[in-house]
Amino acid sequence: MSENNWWTLELEGMPGFEMAMKRVYAWYEGEMLDRPPVRFIAHNAFVDEINQAYPSTNIKDRWFDEEFQVDTFLKSIRGKTFHGETFPVFWPNLGPNFYAALYGAELGFRDVTSWSPPMICDWADVDNLKLDLSNPYAKKIDDLTRCALEKCTGKFMVGYTDLHPGLDCVMVWRGSQQLCLDLYDQPEKVKMLAHLAINDFETIFDHYDCMLKAKRQLSVSWMGIPSFGKMHIPSCDFSAMISSDFFIEFSLPALRRETAHTTHNIYHMDGKGVAKHLDLILNEPGVQAIQWVQGVGDDQPILQWIPLIKKIQAKKPVIVDLQQHELEPFIEQMKPEGLFLWIATKSEEEELAIIKRLERWVATQKHNQSGTPSLVTERRGHLKN
């Protein structure tokens, strides 16, 4: 990317912003500078703080209170230094079904997510599907975005909300069980719904992208990986329930429509059910990278997924979520190129130690590849400064 298309955000807590973006852009291209990019963040940490702090038991009020949402985020980052490629990002959020709600789906709210009852119970209900960027949910995301933009200068980045077009949107409208039946009984009607669920994607995406770019913000969302162009997170969690033939017929057209409009696309591959379509996704030129989400329970630890991660790494950059104790055995089996590591930490000292460990990993590899004896002594199980 031309340097003329870059700009710098002066963020109090992230003095290394420019270098971090250079590492991110090298990663987008499957390349690496001094080390793999690394993001330090605990999942749902910000949400947990909100749940504890909000003065009302009405969950919807808490979701809809833009001043409280933004101010709580500001408090959560006050005095913090963001290391590595951990960008301080506030992203306006009403849950994963927001895209479907732009067409009339109702949202119910829980502590950390939202849900929707099916709204297409009869095929005649399809006539009710109309994009409305001025309905209460759309207005609230606009309010959250504007409030964040007013308070972000010099402190944090503002992202755009979670967008799930395609079959995941159809699943919200129709219900997952009914949609599975529809694929066999009413495939043409499913295609019609899938078309409706992607037809306005460019309009919807650009609505939020323009709000951010007008205030000199980058394109970034819940994943926290920015782009100076248009960054998007395509996904199809529903695909865990369908065959590869159905994925080709019903999901790929939406994926291609999404990726054709945006600059950097990181596919959110949520678990082994979705991973059965990995070869198809890897062959899509519009997908720049894959986020591998291994799941919980028997899907832990990460080491059992090393062969799959290597398969992704051979063709596209990959995000891997590690626990700290997994870092050493992971390093022993992997090469650093093409990796973006997510590691939850509890202190600045842990983060700095991990960064130095990653730098030593790359330095050791370069020494070994050049045939020069390494001056770096690696000790398994220790993150030494």
Image: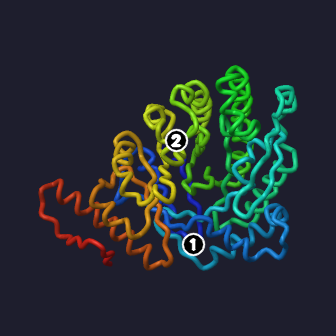
Residue at 66 percent of width and 55 percent of height: 159
Is the residue 294 above or below the residue 250 in the image? below
Query: Is 368 drawn above or below residue 1 in the view shown?
Result: below
Where is residue 164 drawn, in percent x and y? Answer: 67, 42
Q: Amino acid at mark 2?
A: Val
Name the secondary structure under disc 1: loop
Q: Nearer the viewer, residue 240 or 356?
A: 240
- Residue 57 screen position, x and y as percent: 83, 71
Return the residue nearer the eye: 84 or 330: 330
Q: Is residue 130 left or right of residue 316?
A: right
- Residue at 57%, 27% (x, y): give it: 246
Question: At x 31% / y 63%, what residue is drawn?
Answer: 329
Residue that mark 2 sits on: 274
Which is closer to the viewer, label 2 or label 1?
Answer: 2
x, y percent for residue 365: 23, 58
Q: Which mark is residue 13?
A: 1
- Regarding residue 12, the answer to whether it shows in the image is yes
Is 256 located above or below residue 273 in the figure? above
Circle 2/circle 1 CB separation < 8 Å:
no
The image shows residue 334 at horizontal and vertical percentages of 30, 54
